[in-house]
Image: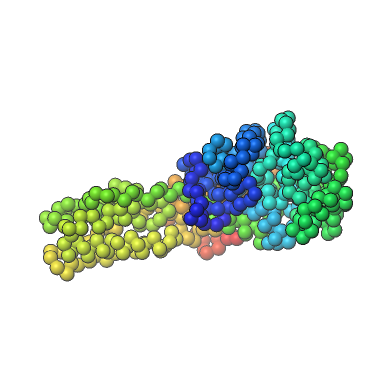
Amino acid sequence: MDALRGEDPRHAGDFVLVARLGSGGMGEVFLGRSPQGRTAAVKLVQPELARDPEFRRRFRLEVAATRKVASPWTASVLAADTESPRPWVATSFVPGLTLTEAVETAGPLPERAVLRIAHGLVHALRDIHAAGLVHRDLKPSNVMLTLDGPTVIDFGIVRAADSSVVTRAGAIVGSPGFMSPEQARGLEAASPSDVFSMGCVLAFAGTGRAPFGSATDSGVPAVLLRVVSEEADLTGLPGSLLSLVAACLAKSPAERPTLVELGEAPAIRSMAAPGHAEWLPAALTSSVARRVTRALDLETPKPPAPPVSQTPTAVPLHDAATVTGATPPSAPPQSSRAPVRGTVGVDPVSRAGRARRPALLTGSVLAVALLAVVLTIIVPGLGEDQPSAEPAPQQSTSGPATPAATPEPTPAGVVPPAFLGAWRGTITGDQERLMTIAQGHIGSTVVVTRTISSDTKCRGTGTLVSAGESAIELDTVVTESIPEGGCVSIGGQRLTRIDDDHLRWDAASGTGILTRQ
C-alpha cells in the first residue's frame, strides 16, 4: 500500500481514492472509500485499453458476469462504471497478503496452511462455477491470505461459461506457469481448467516455486511447452498434498478431479471445522494484522478541508466587539462546528478563520491570533495518539488586556494508544477471540474481530462507543458466519487495560483476558 502519486486520480465515481495498491497489464488498483466509509479495491483500466472497443465490450460482459458471484471466499463487486472515459470496477477490499508475498516473506508454507488454502479455493471455485463462470486466471497473486483463510480476488479475465468467447481467436488468456494445457494451446477453458490452475497454486504454496518454472527465468514459450508436454516439478511437496496436487495437474481435463470430489477428499475436508491454532506462521499472521490495522486507519472518514473564503470575516477566537476594541464578553463563544475526525483538539474553524479583518487587529489581538496559528500548525504534528497541549493565557504587551483563546475541547473520545494493535485470548469458555484495534473516534469502526470455536467461525467489526484512558466500550456486529447463522452478535463489549500487554474483555456473555500479539 503506497501513497498516491501526483498524477494519480483522486476519485472513481463516488469512491475517494486514498492509496495505491498495485498495477498490472490491465490497469491500476487503488484503495478507495465510499461515502458510507466502506473500503474497496478500485481497479481503473489503462487508458490505452479504454480506447479499444473490443476490450470495453469484454470488460462490460465480465463486470456483469462477476456481479453474479456471492461467496464468502471471493471479493464481491461493489460498483462499476464500464462507460466512463476510464472504466473502473470496485470490489470489496481484502486486507491481507497475496500468496506471492507470503512465500517471498516466509518461504514455502507448512502443510496445514496449504491444505487450508486448498479448502478455501475449492469453495471459491465452486461458487464461481455455480454462477456460470470460469475464473481462467487463478494464480498466487490473485489469492489473498487473511486472518480467517484465503480469498480469491481479481476476476480480471473471468468469462461467462455460456457466452461466446470474447477474446480474439488463438489468443492465450491467463498467466504462464499457472494456466492449463488447454489454455496454453488457445483452446476453450472450462471448469477443469480452474482445477489445473488450483493445482499449480497449491504446488507454489507448498514448494515456493511454480511447478512448470518461471517465465522470467526461461521465457514464456519454454514454460508453455512444459505445461503442455512435461510433468510438473513437485519435489518437496508434503505427502498428503502430493497425490492431490498431481491429480489436479493431469494433462487431460477429463482426468482431473471435480471440485465436488476435491471437497470430499479427507485432507481438505478436515479443514472445514475451525480450529484454535493459527493457520498461518506467526510472522505472516503479524504481517496480516498490521495490514488490517493500517486499512482501518485509512477507513476512518475524513471530511474535506473547509473552503478558503475570499471575503474576510471575523476572527473566530473573538467576537466583533473584541476585535473593534469594545468591552469583551465574559467568555468567548464556542464554535458550533464539529472537530476534525481522527485528530485531538483541532477544529477546522481555527484554520479557516485565522487572519480575517487584518486591518482591525490590535497588538493584543495579534498576539492571540499568532498563538492560534502556532497551535494550529503544531497540534496536528503531535499525532492522533498524543493529547493536545492546553495553551497558557497570554498577556498583551500593549493596549488593554485581552482574554486568551479558550482551546477547543478534546473530541468525545478516541482510542488510547495503549489499546492499539492485535490482541488474542480465550473468552466465554472455549472460544478464541482475536481483535485488531486501530485509531478512531466515537462512532467509527475501530475493531476487526474474529472468534473461533469448535463448530463456528465468526468475523465482525466494532464501533467505538466510549473511550477513556483505562477502558473503551464497543458495539460489535457479525459480518461473516461459518456455518451461516451459527454466529450471534454479542453487541456491547468493554475492554479494560490491565497492563501494556493485557486487556480484560467483558460482555454480557462472559469475560476473558486478551494478550498483545
- Can you give x and y, in whole percent of width and height, for residue 176 in the image? 76, 50
Question: Would you identify the image quadrant in which residue 399 lies?
Answer: bottom left
In the displayed structure image, the side of residue 249 where residue 106 appears, left or right: left
Asked if 314 appears above or below 502 in the picture, the reply is above
Asked if 130 appears above or below 309 in the picture, the reply is above
- Residue furthest top as drawn: 162
The colour scheme used to paint the residues is rainbow
Is residue 43 shown to the viewer in this render?
no
Asked if 116 appears above or below 126 in the picture, the reply is below
In the displayed structure image, the side of residue 318 where residue 342 appears, left or right: right
Is residue 24 shown to the viewer in this render?
yes
- Can you give x and y, in whole percent of width and height, for residue 190 in the image? 78, 37
Q: Which quarter shows the N terminus? A: bottom right
- Can you give x and y, in whole percent of width and height, for residue 151 in the image? 67, 46
- Can you give x and y, in whole percent of width and height, for residue 145 in the image? 67, 51
Question: Would you identify the image quadrant in which residue 345 lies?
Answer: bottom left
Q: Which quarter shows the C terminus? A: bottom right
Question: Would you identify the image quadrant in which residue 409 lies?
Answer: bottom left
Asked if 182 appears above or below 415 in the picture, the reply is above
- Residue drawn 17% across and 52% down? 320
- Residue drawn 17% across and 69% down? 397
- Residue drawn 55% across and 57% down? 2
